[in-house]
Structure formats: C-alpha cells, structure tokens
Amino acid sequence: MKPLHKKMIRLAIQRPRIIQTLLRLAYRQKIGAGFDRWRRNGKSSMPCEVKIHLTRRCNLSCTMCNQHRHSKDTDQHIPWCNPDNELPIDVWKNFLDQMASWSSTGYRPWLDISGGEPTIYPHFKEFINHARKHKFFINLLTNGTTLEKNVSFLIDQAVDAVTISIDGPEKHHDSIRGMQGLFKRVEKGIQALREEREQRNSLTPIISLTCTISQANLAVQEQMIPIAEELGVDSIVFNNTTFQSQETVTSHNRILNKELAERENLQIILPSIPEGGYYKSEIRKDDLPNLVQSINTLNAMEKKSPLRVAFAPFSMKSSLLKPYYLDMSYPFPNICDFLWKSIRIHPDGTVSPCLGFMAGNIRNKTVKEIWNGAAYCKFRSLVAKKIFPGCVRCCQRRYTEKVKLGISNQD
C-alpha cells in the first residue's frame, strides 16, 4: 500500500465526510453519470465535482495553455476572460451556501479551485475560508508561484489537497512555463509546505504534482519521479495534452453553429472554438516511440516508488497513444460523462461546461435552476446522441478500445 493510501485512510477517520464525497465521486464516474446519460432526457442528479475558476488572470505564459492564445478580439466576446467581470466574493459565498444545502444527507461534492492562477483572485482567502466552513473537500490547483507565502494559510484552513504544476527539471520547466527561476521558486514553496505540515503533524494538504506531456519535455519524462520523490510530494500525474487540429475545429464550428443554437434555443458563444483558442499538438509520429518507452519506464519505476503515479486521460492505456496523437478519426467511444457529473463555473459566474455553451449565470439564477434547466438538459441530450467534433481530444472523453469492431492499434 502506498503512503498516500495510508494517509487517505487516516484522513477519512479524521474527517468522515470525505468518505461520502469520494464514494459518490466513484459511483458517478463508474455508474451514475452513465445511467443519467442513458435515460436521454438531459436531466442529472447533483454534480459530484465542482470546478471553479476564480479568475482567468495568470502570471505565466505556458506553451500548452489556451488562455494566453486568445486575441483581444476573442477576449471581448468571451465574458469570463475579462477581469473586470470577476465575481464579487458575496456571489461566490452564496453559491457555496447553495451547494452545501443541496443534499439532505449533508453530502459535499469535490471542489477543484483553479484559474488562471486562483491565488491571484483578490478574495481567494475569503473564498477558501467559506468553503472550509461548509466542510467541502478542497483541491487547490496552482502553478506554485505564490505557494510559499500561503503555506500557513493552507494548513490553517485544512485545505485537503494542493496540486502543483511542474513540467520537467529546472531548465525545461522554466522554459515551458515562461519564467526564469520558476522551478526554484516552486521548489521552495513545496519544501515550506511540506515542512510546516510535518511540524504541525497535519495530514493535509496532500501534495500532488502534475506534469503535462509535450514535445518540449519528452526527453526528460523519466526524471520526474525522482524529482517528485526528492520534493517529498505524495503523488504525480502525467497529463497527455488536450488538443485540436484545424480540420476538427473547422468541422466543429460548421456543426455547432448559429442555426443549431437558434433551433435548439441554446446560448452559445460563436464561433464555438475560436481561432487562437485551442492548442495544436506538437507530438509527431517520430516522437511516439520515445513517448511510449518513457511511459512504460515510468510505470516500471512506479512499482518501486513510494509515490502514487497516474496518467491522464485516466481511461487510456499506453497502447492507444498512437491513435490518440496521430489519428483524429480513430473511433474512441462517443461518450462524455462530464456534463452529468461535473459543473464548471467561470470567473464571471457563467456556468459553461465547454464549447462556448452558456447554461446560465449564478449571479441571477440558483445553481439548481441552471443544473437541470431547459438549456442544460437540451445540451446534454445533444451530446448524449453524439459528441461534437470539438470533443475529439477533450480530457473528459473516454479513450478505450472498441474491441467489438475488430480495430487494431498496430501499424
């Protein structure tokens, strides 16, 4: 048993509410969301994940990130990209109150707090404090730039997990993230967090790393487990990039267009995927042997490491890396469960899971009204029939092999 698993058992004993959060998360992922999708009426039971973007502002310019690719023209018609539209803290507090009172059993969904860089939001600490009062499971996703100065606060608030982005050894990480000295800065923050956690004899926050796989760090992937072990974190996740091609974007925008939006009475920001608003993968055919070898090596290293090591998308085996990166027409299952299990709220209060679809805004509607409102149900019904071309490499899609079709992954 990994140290992280032992820690989670001890944490569940200390905070029994976590058990309900994790069990329902697993149930919705494995069974519940699929059942609601199968019913085809567009309705869904309460979300088990709440993805909150406190701000779209960020102090980095990462090579694989969509946000800084937006032009000023693009930002002008995407309301949540304008920092002047960020929600006041009272609206966020009201939203958290609604989520906490949704279930009569006292159930609390998992909160992912991200951005942009969430710690830049001026009321970040007040938001965390209010979420902790309601005993949500809080996972803070951060680039680590402000980690050191927030160490005491995170432990005082008993934040459950902190997930930090590191994309390679010092030279590679600084280059990918666009800031010299960043690795050392993040390293210092992690060390401070770990040391204070130990001094206070606290189980939390659980410290995880995420490493986004790209052509820029392919050659150094195998160094990441030793780096994570040296930093003393609890786990590391290697993320295959989510991306689009010009062809899929063109096809998508041709289908999810003004006519469809008007016919189905949906509010969609058009074009659904704007030019400059997506990442084009740099992984090529010649890179695949090195990528597969690195992942196989990392899997072997994981068996001897105290760390939990995982790869995302979590449903995908390494044997499917070739079609994932090189064959955009490969028939992965046309299944998305995200719309039935997770709710995403942007900095301006817009509830928008993806693709520019706007289900409502928490400024003027309750979360229950939005979650099973007519617009959300209609959008779910469309996706239940068939995912859109823009979903082709979404991180929430299922990436499994269609064995019954007799499809081979061999050359």
Image (cartoon, rainbow, N blue to C red):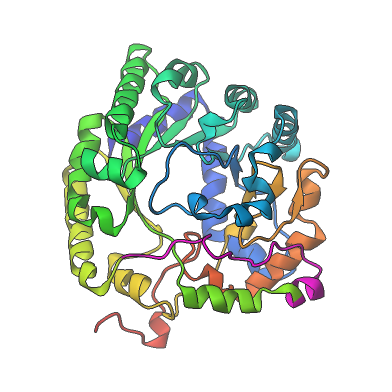
Is 338 one of the magenta-colored residues? no
Expressed as whole percent of the image width and height from the top left, the position of residue 347 reads 65, 41
Q: Left or right of 346: which side holds 280?
A: left
Residue 308 visible, this orientation: no
Rendered image quadrant of residue 197: top left
| In-front residue for pair 95/6 | 95
Q: Is residue 209 placed above or below 293 in the rendered structure?
A: above
Q: Which residue is drawn at 73% across and 36% down?
A: 95
Residue at x-position 41% and y-position 70%: 400
Residue reaching furthest top? 199
Of 241 and 259, the residue lying toward us: 259
- Magenta region's main secondary structure? loop
Toward the viewer: 299 or 23? 299
Question: Image check: 211 left or right of 158?
Answer: left
Q: In the rendered image, which quarter contains the C terminus?
A: bottom left
> Where does the magenta region start and end?
259-282
> What is the count of numbered marks?
0
Residue that extends furthest to the bottom in the rendered view of this protein: 406
Which residue is rendered at x = 16% and y = 44% of the image? 304
Q: Is residue 278 rendered magenta in the image?
A: yes
From what the image shows, is residue 146 above or below residue 355? Answer: above
Which x, y percent locates residue 278?
A: 49, 61
Q: Is residue 135 above or below residue 86?
A: above
Q: Where, by quadrant of the figure, is residue 258 drawn?
A: bottom right
Residue 374 visible in the picture: yes
Q: Provide residue 208's location: percent of width, then percent of height.
A: 36, 37
Q: Is residue 125 left or right of residue 401?
A: right
Q: Residue 369 location in percent, x, y? A: 81, 49
